[in-house]
Image (cartoon, grey):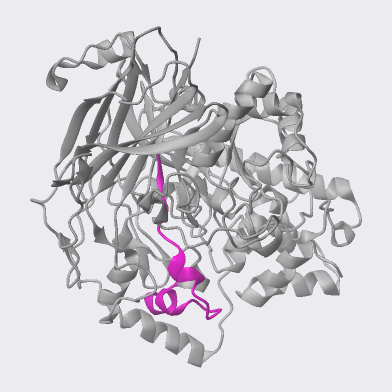
Amino acid sequence: MRWIWIAGSIVVIGAGIAWWQYQSFIHAPLRPSGPEAQAELQAEIESQDESAFEQPDQIPFVARKTNPTRNVYFGDLHIHTSVSFDSYLFGNRLDPDTAYRIAKGEKAEITPGEPVELTTPLDFAALTDHAEGFGLHVACGTLEQNEAGESFCGSLQEPSIAFFLQLRNSGEIRPMKRETSIFQNDPEVARQSARETWANIKEIADRHNEPGRFTTFAGYEYSPVLKDTGKHHRNIIFRSSVSPIDAVSAYDAPSEIDLWKELEATCQGECKFLTIPHNPNRSWGLAFASETIDGVPYTSNDWALRARSEPLVEMFQIKGNSECSAAFGAGDEECNFEQFFPPCENDGDTLCISSTSMIRDGLKKGLTLAQSTGVNPMQFGVIGATDTHNANPGDTEEWDYRGASAFVSSPARRRLEGGRGGNRISVQRNPGGLAAVWAEENTRDALFDAMKRKEVYATSGTRLSLRFFAGFDLNETRVSDVTLEQLYAKGVPMGGELLSEDGTTPNFFISAARDPNSAPLAKVQVIKGWLEDGVEKEKVFDVACGNETRGGENTCLIPTDSVNLADCSWNADAGVSSIRTWWQDPEYDERQSAFYYARVVQNPTCRWSTYDSLRLGLTPPDDVPATVKEMAWSSPIWIKPR
């Protein structure tokens, strides 16, 4: 029998099945792998010394009042639970209800002896299980199966990388086709089963939504397959429970353009949606290419459709940093942060970075497209997320990282030694990032509106606070005297757009504050991209330093000895707790189309692999950095010539 695998999901089956029967399957315990394997796993867990370093105390939830100048809310819009086929096959048995409880601060174990608990509860979350697998657990838990079906459903209960790869590789045939032979050869049975799963996901989101305290969004992931585990996926987020009856999957919409068209056709009236692509760094050049996943060139209408549908892009997550590559553009040294792929040598290469893979290159390309089409389809904001497959939303602290997938990368020795498959991919993963949203209150409407206007920023997991404004009428008064009311009245925040003014250079205001549970700030930078005589260019400016400076261009120095690798403590006296500054572009040209975004860099702290080494009494691995410089990236502000 042929099974069609879609990026962690497989075809759906069944209809009209009681939800309790689904639950009995989805919570089924893992089948024992034998007493020797169980004893080995238990010994690995018991060898971990969780007291080898200091851990922060949990911070209780504090409600914030409605604020006309907006509060920052931290959340995660990319989370997989046991509903996702790949997550389940990798050993995750934590369901959507459990994921939401973890997001709100409850403690859980992803595997016995590997606890997770957020230091600070999240403000919002969206569970984005793979739509291509909706209904699978219902069928395996309830429907009478033939021999092949019984074999498949039984295989789910034994985590297996080989089984995962076998199913995934079969899904690279395009267009993707749903296999219906195990669904009574009835496509409608498969569709109805998926529809019931989607309805339950929305019901659970509504049940956990607590306006003012914790916001949930109904969502899912659209997951076509690329060669060599490439990603051209999108998370679909709905403003409310008013949403299409079906979750549009890669079976229904072969390309991203088909996805947007189908969503616009089925999400009307009070229904509102947005799509968020993730892992541009693993898109093998497709993220910001001029053609679809099937090589069909974009038309001007397609570009406009993308601009309407996709206001955000995921900058940072477990599978790496998608900001930039040192091989392209300005040669920015910070581009190497959690990025392990080399530049591509040839068009069509995989496992490498091309010039249309990274966000900064996409932003520059958008300026060019705006000149030729009149629409900038890449005028997007940026967020961070986890893409966790352990159902632990927002668990982004380095010390608490338990791997991306329970069976593959847990416990600590398995993470460090390359996982069950014996490769180093697990070591190259990271805890992921967070989405930060500036909104008047913690509600679906307020947060969704902020995402649509792009007043959002990405972090690499830290809870840095970051403001970024620009305006031609902003006066360079003392930064201590600036008020948010003035900034909103006379300027635009991150995500905004300005029209140039003759003979006037815009003023930029940047305010950043450290995460109370992480290291001090090292520097604030502004990244500029612009068109000069039709040529795309970029430059990085150090605009404020938390430590010493070097040379005449005010280049910030980052200390190399501010963290103690013996216990991962950091020097609280190095760097600064906050930075507020004005800045003007010394090379500003009012005739040029340009964008600017702010980047904040912390002093170094231990990477998760160093924390795990301390747990096990080992020397940190030498093929990944021992420390990281956590970052935050604002959404850009665009300036258009008149």
Q: Is residue 539 left or right of residue 580?
A: right
Q: Which of the pair 418/52 is nearer the observer?
A: 418
Asked whether 335 falls inside the magenta stretch, the response is no
The answer to whether any part of residue 515 appears in the image is no
Farthest residue toward the left? 573
Q: Is residue 156 left or right of residue 549?
A: right
Residue 467, x across and y down, in percent: 30, 28
Asked whether 414 falls inside the magenta stretch, the response is yes
Q: Residue at x 82, y 59 (%)?
A: 173
Q: Which of the pair 568/270 is nearer the observer?
A: 568
590 up-or-down from 312: above or below: above
Residue 637, x across and y down, in percent: 42, 24
Residue 378, x across and y down, in percent: 57, 31
Q: Which quadrant: the N terminus?
A: bottom right
Instruction: Read off the magenta span.
Output: 410-435
Q: Which of the pair 616/602 is nearer the observer?
A: 602
Task: Examine the image and state in which quarter residue 339 appears.
Answer: bottom left
